[in-house]
Image (spheres, coloured by chain):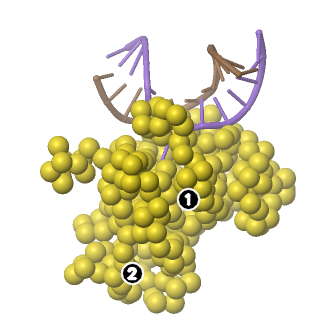
Chain colours: A yellow, B purple, C brown
Amino acid sequence: MVKQRITDFDIHQISNSGQCFRMDKTDNGAMLIAGDRYLDVIYKDDEWVFSCSQKEFDEVWQHYFDFNTNYSKFKEMIDTNDSYMMKAAECGSGIRILNQELYETIISFIISQQNNITRIKKCIRVISEKFGEEKKNYKDEIYYAFPKIEVLSKLNEEDLKECGLGYRSRYIIETSRAISIGFVDLNSLIKMSYEEAKNELIKLSGIGNKVADCVCLFALHHIDAFPIDTHIRDVLNRHYKDGFPMERYEGFAGVLQQYAFYYEIYGEKFLRLSGKI
DNA sequence: GGACAGGGTTACG
DNA sequence: CGTAACCCTGTC
């Protein structure tokens, strides 16, 4: 167990921010599976409690949750005249950009296209149960690691049928094969700049502009990546008619994208609870 | 019951 | 460069 006071952190906000699909709310926190690891996170007596050893926390989760980055700094850099972003950042003030495993993120966001979150989660759960390694957590409960590329790259579209992926099955298999034969090298991808990495990712089947940006932001931690999905497009149309001020927010626009995304989905609820409407 | 849309990408015109 | 088609499930 690791107990810690942490600022700019809210596991529920992160869970609802759309960057991960294997995190679920529990009584006073959340449980999550990342790669082949399981973690419970609980909020108790003003402290966050993590169900892992100090060693695992230091080696894995510290980086996963991006705890070494100061998010107050990003919020302070928001233009105070940018009232929409000021409100969005206040609403999602506990959001951090996770450092997720690359292959898992690639496949997860291929699944996310033309799809809703409930179904994305279900698809990922089923593909993991069918093709991921069966493991046991510290409570002796069974869970399933995300499938390895060695497994998925050897499947046929028929094998994925029960996962309910639809036309995305072909993308998953083609992309897995392309990576496994070295058409795109994940280890080099990690070392590339945002632009280079994005250009490489787009070479893969089923990855276009938006999914590539999601992978850059949520796995490669290029926090200047700014994925534009239908919700963010709405935000830009409503609040940034003259274009989003990328120059002003250069270097961390992706963090703001997350605040805006969360605010779009949960903002009204937030305003209601804080008595602002 | 059928029509439609859901955090896009691809393959055509 | 714009637009239809792609698959599957949930919802109305």
Disc 1 and disc 2 on one polypeptide chain = yes
Q: Which amino acid does label 2 sit on?
A: Ser
Secondary element at tag 2:
loop
- Of callouts 1 and 2, the N-terminal one: 2
Residue plotted at (18% across, 54% down):
A274
Tell which subunit mark 2 falls on. Answer: A
Q: Which of A92 and A13 is in front in this view?
A: A92
Residue plotted at (74% across, 60% down):
A193
Asked whether residue A160 appears in the rendered view, the answer is no
In terms of image quadrants, where is residue A116? top left
In the image, residue A267 sits, relative to residue A31, either above or below, namely above
Check the image and name the residue furthest to the front: A81
Q: Nearer the viewer, residue A129 or A263?
A: A263
Tell which subunit mark 1 falls on. Answer: A
Q: What residue type is labelled 1?
A: Phe
Give percent across and percent down for residue A275.
15, 51
Asked whether residue A190 appears in the rendered view, the answer is yes
Give percent across and percent down for residue A211.
62, 45
Residue under numbered circle 1: A252
Give percent across and percent down for residue A164.
53, 40
Question: How many badges with numbers are in the image?
Answer: 2
* Quadrant (top left, top right, bottom left, bottom right) of the N terminus of chain A: bottom left
Q: Which of A254 and A79 is in front in this view?
A: A79
Question: Which disc, if any, is residue A156?
Answer: none
* Quadrant (top left, top right, bottom left, bottom right) of the C terminus of chain A: top left
Residue under numbered circle 2: A51
Task: Give me the C-alpha separation between circle 1 and circle 2.
Answer: 31 Å
Residue plotted at (38% across, 69% down):
A9
Give percent across and percent down for residue A55.
51, 90
Estimate how packed mark 2 is, as few (under 14), some (14 to 19) or many (20 or more) residues with alpha carbons within 10 Å.
many
